[in-house]
Amino acid sequence: MRWSKLYLPTYKESPSDAEIPSHKLMIRAGAIKKLTSGVYTFLPVGFRVLRKIEAIVREEMDAIGSQEILMPILHPAELYEESGRLQNFGPELFKLNDRKQRMFALGPTHEEVVTDLARAEMRSYRQLPQTLYQILTKFRDEIRPRFGVMRAREFIMKDAYSFHDSDESLEVTYQDMAGAYHRILDRCGLDHMMVEADAGVIGGDVNHEFIVLTEAGESEIFTCSCGYTANSERAESLGQPLSSNESVAEGSPVRVETPGQKTIDEVSAFLEADPSQLVKTLLYRSEGQIVAALIPGDRSLNEVKLMKLLGDPQVQTLGDQEILDVTGAPVGFSGPVGLPKSTRIIADKLLESYEGMIVGANENDAHLRGVKMGRDFVPTETASISEAKAGDTCPRCAKYELVTQRGVELGHIFKLGKKYSRSMNATYLDRDGKDHKFIMGCYGFGVSRAVAAAVEANHDERGIVWPRSITPFHAIVLPINVSDDHTIKVAESIYAELSEQGLDVLFDDRDLRAGFRFKDADLIGVPLRITLGERSLRENKIEIYYRGEDRSELVDPGNVAGLIKAYYDEKPAA
Ligand SMILES: [Zn+2]
C-alpha cells in the first residue's frame, strides 16, 4: 500500500470532545471519524485493526466448536414483550415503527432472537448442546455516549449463545468460553483479568467480566492476593477496623444540636467524631414503598446492589420535599429512628459491627448520638449495599486487603440458566418425550471497543503503539529522499520482498519533510519503520526503528526481510 494512495487523514490536534487518550489518538491517527454523537466510521487504518481482531475472535470461537451465524439487526418488539425486556432495557433500546405501525427494535443483544430460533429449531435433546455466535453491529441508546468507540451507541460485538440440557453441560461450555476469551485477549496482546461481575439487564445467575487493565478505564476492579476478583458493582468487603467507636448512650440516644451542619464532613467536624461513626440515611421510593438505606458515613451507596436487592431497576431517590414529608426534616437530618412504620429499612452489613452510631434526628438542625441498632430502631434487613474501598479486608479470605485497579470491560460471559427459555417458553424433548426448558449461556465480546482498549493500553506521548498481532501494517518503508533513484530502487525491492512474505507494508512515498513523516509514522503506531537514507545506503545500511522500544539498528539491506519476519514470528514477551 502506497501512503500517497491511502485514505489516512492525520491531525496535530485532538477534537475538543475527546477526553481519553484512545479517543484522541484514534481520531488524530485517522483510524475513526465521528458521524454524530456515539456513532463512528472506521477508516482504512482503524478498519484493518478491527478486521484483525475479528479474525482472532473467529478462530478462537471456531476452535471451541461455536458455529457462526448471522442474525437480523431488526427485531420485532413482541419478542421483547415476551421476555420482559421492553421494560427493563428502558430508553436504551432503540425503537422504530414500520409503515404498518408495527414496533421494532434495533438489536442491543440477541437473547430473544436466538431463543426464538432455538424454540423453533432445536426440538430434541439429541441436538444439544449447541453454541452459536455472530459478529454484528449492535445498538444501544447510551445516555451519555463518550470516549469515541469505547462507549458508542452503535458498536460491533461478538455475541455467542449456548443451549443445554443440564447445568453440567453449561459449565463445560462456560469454561471453554472463558478459556477462549483469555486466549483472544492474550493473542491481541492485552493484559487482562477475569472478574466476578453484576448481570445488569442481561440477567442470570453467574457471570464474569474480562477487563483489560488501563489507567483511564471506566471499570474499577477489586483484587486480593488470595485470588478474589470482582468489579466495583459486585465487590463485597469486610470493611476496615473502626478507628474509634461511638459509645452507646444509656437507655436512649442523646439528641444534640447541629445547627446548619448537613454534610458528613460538617457534622463530623462539628461533633469531633470520625466520619465512619456517622451513618448516612438515604431515602428512595421503590414500587410505592419508601426505602431507607443506611450506610457508614465514609462510604458510598452501591446503587446496583440496592436495585438488585429490591428487584427494581427503576428505584428513585426522594426529592427534597418528599424527604421533608416523610421524615419531618429537611435534607441532611434524616435518620432511622422514628421513621414511618411502613418504611423498609435496609442496613449495610458493615453496620453490624457498630456498637453505637450518630444519625440524623429527623428534626431540623439536630442529630442523635449513641444510637444502637436493634434497640433504637430495627432494620427490616441487613445486606451489603455500600461500595468496597481499597484497603478493605477481603470478603473471601478475611485476611488480606483489597487493592483496586482500573480497566476497560471487553468481555462479559453469563450463565443465564432458564431466564429466557422460561419467559419465552423455549423447550426441547428429552429421551422420554417430555418437555424441558433450555438451560442457556450467553457470551459477549466488544470487538470495536477492543480497538480502543488496545490503544488505551498501548500508547505514548507521540502516538499509538499497536500490539504486533493487530497492527494495521507490519512495517512502514520510508525512503527519505523520494526523488533519489537508487533509494527508491532499494526501497521498492524491500517492499516487494516483505509483501511476498505476506506482510502488510505501508510504503511512505510522500514527497514531504522527513521529520513530518516520522511524526506521522509514530502517531499511527506501526511497530517497525524501515528508513532508507542516501548517506547510510552508500555504506549499504538501512535503519530499522522499533517503535515500542524506541530503539533503532542499522542492518544490511539483504537482512531486512529476515529480521522483520523474525520479529513477527517471535512471541511478544508480555
Ligand atoms: Zn482474599
Image (cartoon, grey):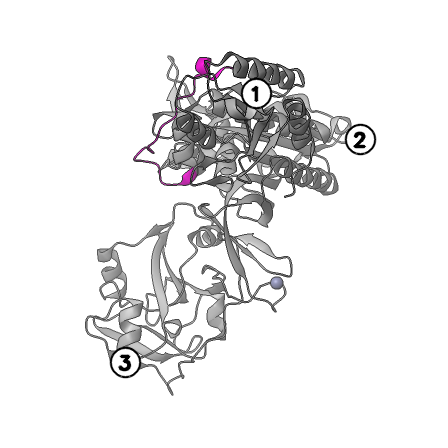
Q: Which residues are magenta?
A: 1-21
Question: In the picture, residue 537 is in which quadrant?
Answer: top right
Instruction: Single out the residue that lies furthest toward the bottom.
Output: 250
Between 176 and 220, the one nearer to me in the picture:
220
Tell me the crowding category of disc 2: few under 14, some 14 to 19, or many 20 or more residues within 10 angstroms, Cα based. few
Is residue 250 positioned above or below 185 on the image? below
Q: Identify the residue position indicated by label 1 in the image.
A: 505
Q: Quadrant of ligand 1?
A: bottom right
Of the two numbered discs 3 and 1 on the same chain, state the one appearing first in sequence: 3
* Secondary element at tag 3: strand
Callout 3 touching callout 1 (CB < 8 Å): no
Q: Amino acid at mark 1?
A: Val
Between 415 and 480, the one nearer to me in the picture:
480
- Rendering coords of residue 378 (x, y %): 43, 71
Q: What distance separates the C-alpha of mark 3 from that of mark 2?
A: 70 Å
Q: Is residue 42 shown in magenta?
A: no
Tell me the tag on residue 160: none
Is residue 244 positioned above or below 335 on the image? below
Q: Identify the residue position indicated by label 2 in the image.
A: 431
* Secondary element at tag 2: loop
- Rendering coords of residue 210 (x, y %): 58, 43
Instruction: Single out the residue that lies furthest toward the right.
Output: 431
Q: Identify the residue position indicated by label 3 in the image.
A: 255
Between 411 and 380, the one nearer to me in the picture:
411
